[in-house]
Amino acid sequence: MNNKYEEFHSSAIIQKRIIKNNNYTYYDVVRTLKKILSKHKKLKILDYGCGVGTISLYLASLGHDVIGLDVSKNAIKMARASAKSLKIKNAKFFILNKLDCNKMKKAFDLVLMIEVIEHVPNDKKVMKEVSNYLKKNGYLILTTPSIEAPLYKLGLLKSFDNRVGHIRRYTQLNLIQLIEEAGIKTIKLSTHESIMRNFFYTNSHIGWILKFIKGPISSLFILLEQPLIRLFGGSNYKLIGIKK
C-alpha cells in the first residue's frame, strides 16, 4: 500500500509560498481552522497524514508549533524541503512508522486528519491512537469522503477510490460512532465539497484545471460551492470533535 502513496507523491515539488485563505483546494479546512485558532494565540498541532505539508506550513506561518506525520517518505522529504525553502522552523515532519508515538501522548491541542481515515486498514485502532495524542478538551478536525457523494452514488468514483487507496467511505452515523468510541465528542458534522469540486479532484483528465483556479477566480468558484451542495449534496464530511 505504501508504494501507492510513494508514487502519488513522486511528482511533488517544493512549495514556494504559503497558501492563502481563499485557496480553492483548502479553503473549507482553512475557514474551520481560523474559527478555532481565533480563540488561541499558540497551539501545539499534529497534522496526521500531512502529505507534502501544505496545511502544516500554513499553520506554522501563523506561529503555531506543528508536527506533520505521513507514511510516505517522498511526502516527508518534500515537506522538509518546503519548510527549509520557506524558512519555517516551527514545523517538523516525520515518517509515521519510524516515530515513537508514545512520546506524543496527550501532547496536542489540535489534531488534523484531512482525507486520511478512509485510507487506513484499521480505522478504529488509528482513531484511538489519535485520540491519545490529544489533551483533554483538545480539538479534532477530520475530513473524509461521503458514501452519499453524488458522483459516487452514480457509480463514477470506483476507479478513483481504487487508484488513490480509499478502503471505505462513511455515513454520518458510522463517522460519529467511530470517533465517539475513541473518546472524542462530535461538536459539528457537516458536508462540504460540491459535485463540481469533487469532479475536478477525481477526474485525472481535467484535474489540471485546479492549478489555474487562483485569486479572484478562486473566490468565484468558492461562491458556487454552497448552492451546488444545496442542489446535489456534498461529497465529503467535515467533523469537528473535542477530546472528552
Image: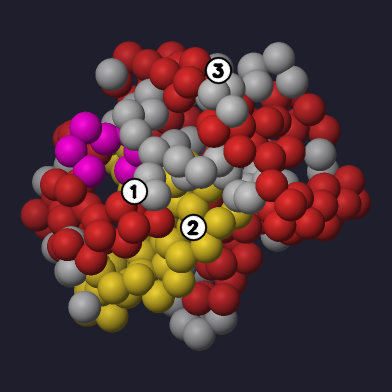
In the image shown, does 14 or 211 lie closer to the viewer?
Answer: 211
- Above or below — where is 172 with respect to 168? below
Quadrant position of the N terminus in the picture: top left
Query: How many other residues sit within 10 Å of disc 2, few (<14), some (14-19) or many (≥20)?
Result: many
Residue 83 screen position, x and y as percent: 50, 44
Q: Which residue is mark 2?
A: 238
Query: How many other residues sit within 10 Å of disc 3, few (<14), some (14-19) or many (≥20)?
Result: few
Does the image show residue 44? no
Q: Which residue is mark 1?
A: 48
Using residue 32 as the reference point, say whether residue 80 is left or right of it.
left
> What secondary structure is found at the residue carrying circle 1?
strand
Mark closest to the chain's N terminus, 1 or 2: 1
| Residue beneath the point at 89% across and 46% down | 217
Nearer the observer, disc 2 or disc 3? Answer: 2
Nearer the observer, disc 1 or disc 3? Answer: 1
Q: CA distance from mark 2 to mark 3?
A: 28 Å
> What secondary structure is found at the residue carrying circle 2?
strand
In the image shown, does 66 or 189 lie closer to the viewer?
Answer: 189
Which stretch is magenta? 117-123
Using residue 90 as the reference point, say whether residue 173 is left or right of it.
left
| Residue beneath the point at 76% across and 31% down | 211
Q: Which residue is mark 3?
A: 11
The answer to whether mark 2 and mark 3 are in CB contact below 8 A is: no
Using residue 137 as the reference point, say whether residue 4 is left or right of it.
right
The answer to whether mark 1 and mark 3 are in CB contact below 8 A is: no
> What secondary structure is found at the residue carrying circle 3?
loop
